[in-house]
Amino acid sequence: MAIIEKENGVTVLHPLGSQTPPRTWRSWLIGRPLQTADAPHQTIGKAIGLAVFASDALSSTAYATQEILFILAVAGTATFGYAFPISIAIVVLMAIVTISYEQTIHAYPNGGGAYIVSRDNLGELPAQIAGAALLTDYILTVSVSVSSGVAQITSAYPMLYDLRVAIAVVMVLFIMLINLRGVKESGITFAIPTYFFLVMMFLTVGVGFFRYLTGSLGTVPNPPELELHGSLQPVTLFLLLHAFSSGTAALTGIEAVSNGIPAFKEPRSHNAGVTLIWMASILGTLFLGITFLTSQIGGIPSETETIISQLSRTIYDGRGFFYLAILSATAVILIMAANTAFADFPRLSALMAADGFLPRQFTYRGSRLVYSRGIIALAIIASLLIVIFQASVNALIPLYAIGVFLSFTLSQTGMARRWRRSGHLAADQTVSEHGSVLQHDARWKLKMVINGFGAVCTTIVMIVFAITKFRDGAYVVIFLIPLLVFSFWSIHRHYRHLAQRLSLRNYSGAPPRHSRHRVILLIGGVHQGTLAALRYAGLLSDDITAVHVSTNPDEAERVRREWEWWGNGIRMVILDSPYRLLLEPLLAYINEIDARRQPNEIITIVVPQFVPRHWWHNLLHTQTAFWLRMVLLFRPGIVITDVPYQIE
């Protein structure tokens, strides 16, 4: 092992080698563990990035047109002619949002989602509102996209309709499993079906336009019955705005690329920006094409048969090979659209957890270098929604887009303020922020106008959506977001109070006492709780070794420096853990010490543990002492002692 002597007499040891994780059933299920150093090799290019981050947006072409028609249907089939003009307005809005987010991507090369942009430019409260809106959106993305994909399956095979909820939950768990294997592997897995969907969809729309131009398209044979609840309503501005707000579901997922910039290969901003432009161009083309052809064939919105099914069997004259191929591709892309949420939800929850607004456990990467706790949490919550709403797309859609446009508005407002701030900087002046570096931009006025106009447009759409969809279920999200923000701040207050109580600032310490024992003191950081445990260890023995498991070199260096100052000369052992394991390196070190243990010698392992004021605060912290005690409970000659430090 390497020994480093410091000037003040503290010895820091770095044992050579690392603890390789054993192969278990988890290795077979999600793949072999990856070292932290492998992270740069897990990035993806534009082609794979389109499959990972654009599947949500692209999949909306399968149901956006249908949602417009569902609203127009209350005024009769004669109003279906308004669907295409409404879709043009939606595509114009899509272009505005895309241009705005393209600027965001280049301004925030480390990830410029609404949360980071709002935090840096608008403050913590708007950032938490954006975070709540995005988390809600990602959960609903999984529920809606999977439910819509299952609807495509039941359209082709009606006998499976009663099993739709079970099928949807199984699909969510399958996507969760694939994402636990890592971003790069999940992207490669989903790339083939994504491009198969694009090929089949462009082929279907192309054949449809050819038949339309040659006069052989015709209308839907045996269309489903139009379901009307009550008498026909007149065509009003409110009805058209209601249909417009339903169709804006096509914009969901636009922000996903800006949130996932760190997943791209270098140059990250360039690759992410190109991917965003590709996505928006494909989405707008398909959305307009499907809506136009649907109006020509007389498609009827129905819960039992989707618009894509009606369009396909009209274009291909029945339920033959191409019909089954397009429905299969659509079902797969809709189910895969959940992958966008699985890519972004864990990243956002990790950012919020790092800021202290979600449990710290969300910041930990799993064995495959993904935020596995966020992935699992998303799968559980989305599955519950699918069960509650019985996998009904029509019931889930009203909950869907309001969070999206709230995050759009906050992001664009934040960017407009950023450009204004940059315009007031000197040409050689720079300001370092959490998410980026702010410097003078000669075109700040133009960029501010673009983002400001985008903010105005998305604000109007958000208000329209909230009003027109309020009774349909949007009120749930309107009340849910403030509740989530309140929860975030409650968690943040706990962590802030904890940091204050553990702070070493203005802390003088106390002299140690001595006894006889071999003591191993586990430390995750240097704070008042650590020093309380050190004083207790000093009561047991003069032979004390502080042990720190290093999963982050920078964090380990900080702990080492603080230990030099506060460790009273006690030697330290730093166990490098490139696989981010905690117990395994500790157990290997303890086994090594135990093998050299003398007769009648006792090894005492001291674990600092702070006790929060409320029992439920324990859910926000790892329980190292508990798990270590479970592992070593039956080992003779080894004593586990946790030293509680009460937080008042």
Image: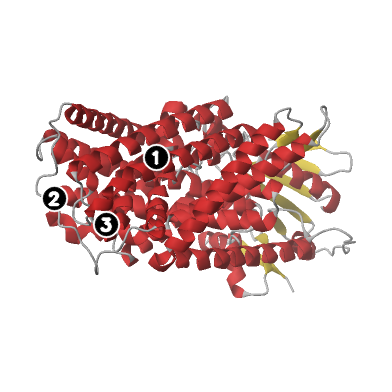
The disc, 3 or 1, on the residue closer to the chain's N-terminal end is: 3
Which residue is at the front of the view, 629 or 353? 353
Q: Residue at point 78% right, 63% down?
A: 500
Q: CA distance from mark 2 to mark 1?
A: 26 Å
Say above or below: 566 vs 17: below
Q: Secondary structure at mark 2?
A: loop
In the image, residue 603 above or below residue 53: below
> Mark 3 to mark 1: distance in Å?
19 Å
Kind of residue indicated by mark 3: Ala
Give the residue at mark 3.
73
Residue at point 25%, 55% (across, down): 167
Q: Determine crowd level at label 2: few under 14, some 14-19, many 20+ residues with C-alpha closer than 10 A.
A: some
Q: Which residue is rendered at x = 18% and y = 45% of the image?
A: 310
Q: Mark 2 sits on what residue?
A: 223
> How far, Cα to Cα, is label 2 from label 3?
14 Å
Q: Mark 3 and mark 2 in contact (Cβ < 8 Å)?
A: no
SS assignment at label 3: helix
Q: Determine the secondary structure under disc 1.
A: helix
Residue 178 vs residue 81: left or right?
right
Q: Residues within 10 Å of mark 1 (few under 14, many from 20)?
A: some
Q: Horizontally, is 395 left or right of 482 in the view? A: left
**Viewport quadrant of the N terminus:** top right
Which residue has dot 1 on it? 88
Mark toward the viewer: 2 or 1: 1
Tag 2 and tag 1, C-beta contact below 8 Å: no
